[in-house]
Image: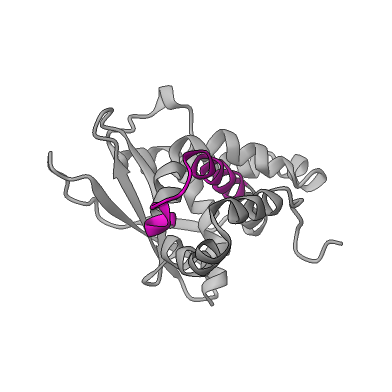
Amino acid sequence: MFKRFILMVSALFMSLSVMATEIDATQPYDMIMKVSDKAFSRLGAEQDKIQADPDYLKVVVEEELMPYVNYRYAALKLLGPNLKGAKREEVLEFIEAFRAYLVTSYAQVLTQYTGQDVKFGPEPKIDEKTTIIGVKVTIMDSPRPNINLEFKLRKDKKTGEWKAFDMIAEGISLLSSKQSEWNTKIRQEGVLSVAQELEQLAKAPIRFEGSK
């Protein structure tokens, strides 16, 4: 069941995507609302190109999604206590490997996008001290049950801009689940070993379900 949540999330993350000059990233809720139409429109308009070359979804993710994902913060949060004693160059390689892994992961799940409607929850209250918020979203997936999600966004204290760093599906944090999955391996084999594994995973071609 959780897999279905993840399969749907990338389409929703795409609601963070549009040229930086066209949105105000200091207003996280409005940012998500205003850019969603353009993001979903691109997926619909370029379906022929995507069907002919599924790896093109990686380009879409790079251009439309990654500028609005705080992959560095997410990677460091994922490493957690494993940062202690780790070499700086290995941590930097892990961050870049994690970013590449996210690009491929989101591109792969975008193959599941079939034009589902999205409804946003109420705007979260934000004051000058707020640095992390959640934006609740419901994906209307009839005739199957709707999918309840919450995106976690973090404010950059220097720029005042917000970026997404985690997604919670039915109460389960994607970041925390990955931390649990990789934590033991990082402790046993080291940061660099996991970074190299992520680099290999990132090279995987994008495939539609049922394709060979």
One can see residue 105 in this view: no
Say how many tags the image has: 0
Quick check: is 175 in the magenta stretch? Answer: no
* Colour pattern of the rendering: one colour
| Residue sitting at the far top | 21
**Quadrant occupied by the N terminus:** bottom right
Identity of the residue drawn at 73% across and 48% down: 203
From the top left corner, tell me how far across and down residue 132 is, in percent.
25, 49
169 or 187, which lies in front? 187
Q: Quadrant of residue 131?
A: top left
From the top left corner, tell me how far across and down residue 196 is, in percent.
65, 50
Identity of the residue drawn at 26% across and 51% down: 133
184 or 177, which lies in front? 184
Q: Which residues are magenta?
A: 79-103
| Residue sitting at the far left | 128
Q: Quadrant of residue 47?
A: top right
**Quadrant occupied by the C terminus:** bottom right
Q: Is residue 180 left or right of residue 196?
A: left
One can see residue 80 in this view: yes
Residue 181 against residue 114 in the figure, above or below: below
Residue 183 against residue 204 in the figure, above or below: below
Identity of the residue drawn at 54% across and 36% down: 64
Q: Is residue 101 left or right of residue 79?
A: right
Q: Is residue 149 left or right of residue 127?
A: right
